Each structure stands twice: as structure tokens, then as C-alpha cells.
Amino acid sequence: MKLKAALLFASLFLILTFSSAQELNLPRKSPKAAAAYTIGYTEVSIEYSSPAVRGREIWGGVVPYGELWRAGANEATTIEFSTDVEVEGQPLPAGKYSFFLLPQKEGKWTAVFNKTWDQWGAYNYGQDQDALRVEVDAQFSKQINQENLRYEVIGQNIENGYLLLSWEKLRLYLRIKVNAMQKAMLEVTQALAAAPEEEKWRINAQAADFLLWVGQPEPAMQYVEESIRQKPSSFNYWIKARILAFQENYPEALAEVDKARKLAETNPEDHYYNDARKEIEATIEKWKEQ
């Protein structure tokens, strides 16, 4: 009995000792990292832990094929979208998700967005909480080796971009599409409705400049013509000139630049042409060469 009591006391002492011991605050082997980017109006942010290769066999080794992987280390990788998006052509509501991958030795991998974002690894993963599963091509570089796992968001234009995961020789791209144009044009409509008449020309000119920037010269021309009708200025004539140049109509573009210059010379309150003279003159020299 005395021996049993002694053993019980020793076990209880060890339990109490370890339970009260302080956790060591040491640097992580896989440090925390983050990436963020804005596509159109949509903020995309990723938080993850970044493991290193350290000479290990990653694919089929550290990361087994056919098993769900946290797409990082430590806590589950999280991805947050501030608006509704499409990933690989499939709709995904705005929100924060844990992100997993199902690697395969052959064929496409599966990318998983799970609604339970606050979890450690994939140990408590529940498929019933999946918000989206999409198949994606896993590309492997022959030359470039990424030592530490890295995420990036790459913008293409105001409505499209890629989420890129790089580690070892893996390059995995997920296509992201957002709906920015509809919201942008609604902003224009609302601004025109609220603006006093004397300011509408400026909003129409800004709308034309934006539409030209996104590669839509036809609607851009409609807005800039309305702006000129409301109030001719060197600003809106210069936008019209750029639209015509975009359409490769350089003679008419140069004629509109001349109108902009004359307006600035005759109206002391029209500062745009003179303020942007260096850029404008460098541009029209290029047009003359066409």
C-alpha cells in the first residue's frame, strides 16, 4: 500500500509540474507570413505559416499525396475576400476561409475553402463546412526552387487576378474574378445624379478616363462627348484625343490636342494642359511617328 501511495503521489506531482510549466516562446520553424492585394474593389488577404524545404523531399514526403494538406504549416492557412468572388469560375461568397489542398501524384489537385477558418492544421477539418472545392493544375518548375513557402496575389486588371502558391518547384495558380465594373459604373451614375449641373462635366470626363483605362473606348467616347458638351476644357479634349489615339486615329487625336492647347491659352482658369504639358507633348511626339 505504501508503494502504491508513493507511486500515485509521484504521478500527481509530475502532472501538476508539467501542467503549471510555462510554454517556451521560441521562434517558429515556420514563421508567420501574410499577403494582401486589391483587385477592383475586392481586398484579398492571406495569412499562413511559411515552412522551408531544408533539403527534404516535399511532394510525396513532407506533404503526402492523397491527404488533405493545410497548404502551409501550424494553424490552417486562411484566405479572406471582402466581396463575393469567383474562384476557378465557381462562386464564393465574401468571408474568411481556411484553405487546404489535396495533392495528387498524377492529375489535378483539389483546392478547398472551408468555413471553419480558426483551426490548427487539418486535424479538426470537417468536409461538411466546405464552402467550395475546385480542381486546379499543379505546375512544377524545372529550374526555379522556392525555399520558403510563399503566397502572392497577382492582379491582371480590375476584375481578374491569380492567387499564387510557390514552394519548392511547385507553382499553383488559382484564378480569381471579381465584379468591379458594375459597381464602378453605379458609382458614376450616382455621382452624376447627386452633382450640381456645373460639376457634371468633370464626372463625365473622369468616367471617360476610367473607361479608356480599362480598355473600353466606345463608352468612354460617349462620356467624354457629353463632358465637352457640358463644358469644353483642355482636360476633356485631352481625354478625347487619347481615346482616338487608342483607336489608332492619330490625325484626329492630334486635332483634339490642338483644341485642348488653344482652350488653355485663352482661358486663364484652365490649368490642366499647362500642368501636364511635358507629358502631353512627349505623347503627341510619339503619335506623330505613327
Image (cartoon, rainbow, N blue to C red):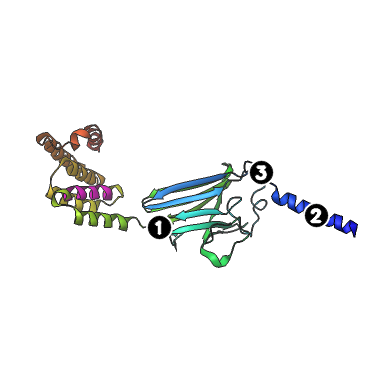
Which residue lies at the image location 65% right of the left edge and 42% below the top edge? 54
Question: Callout 1, which amino acid?
Answer: Thr
Residue 11, labelled with which disc?
Answer: 2
Reading the image, the residue beneath label 3 is 24
Residue 80 visible, this angle: yes
Q: Earlier in the sequence, mark 1 or mark 2?
A: 2
Tag nearer the camera, 3 or 2:
2
Give SS at disc 2. helix
Residue 267 locus on image (x, y percent): 10, 37
Distance from the alpha carbon under mark 1 to that under mark 3: 39 Å
Range covered by the magenta-colored residues:
200-211
Near mark 2 (Cα within 10 A), the count class, few <14, some 14-19 or many ≥20, is few
Q: Amino acid at mark 3?
A: Leu
Is label 1 in contact with label 2 (beta carbons under 8 Å)?
no
Nearest-to-viewer mark from 1 and 3: 3
Identify the residue position indicated by label 1 in the image: 83
User: Alpha-carbon distance for marks 1 and 2?
Assistant: 54 Å
In which quarter of the view is residue 194 placed?
bottom left
Name of the residue lying farthest toward the left: 266
Tags 1 and 3 touching, CB below 8 Å: no
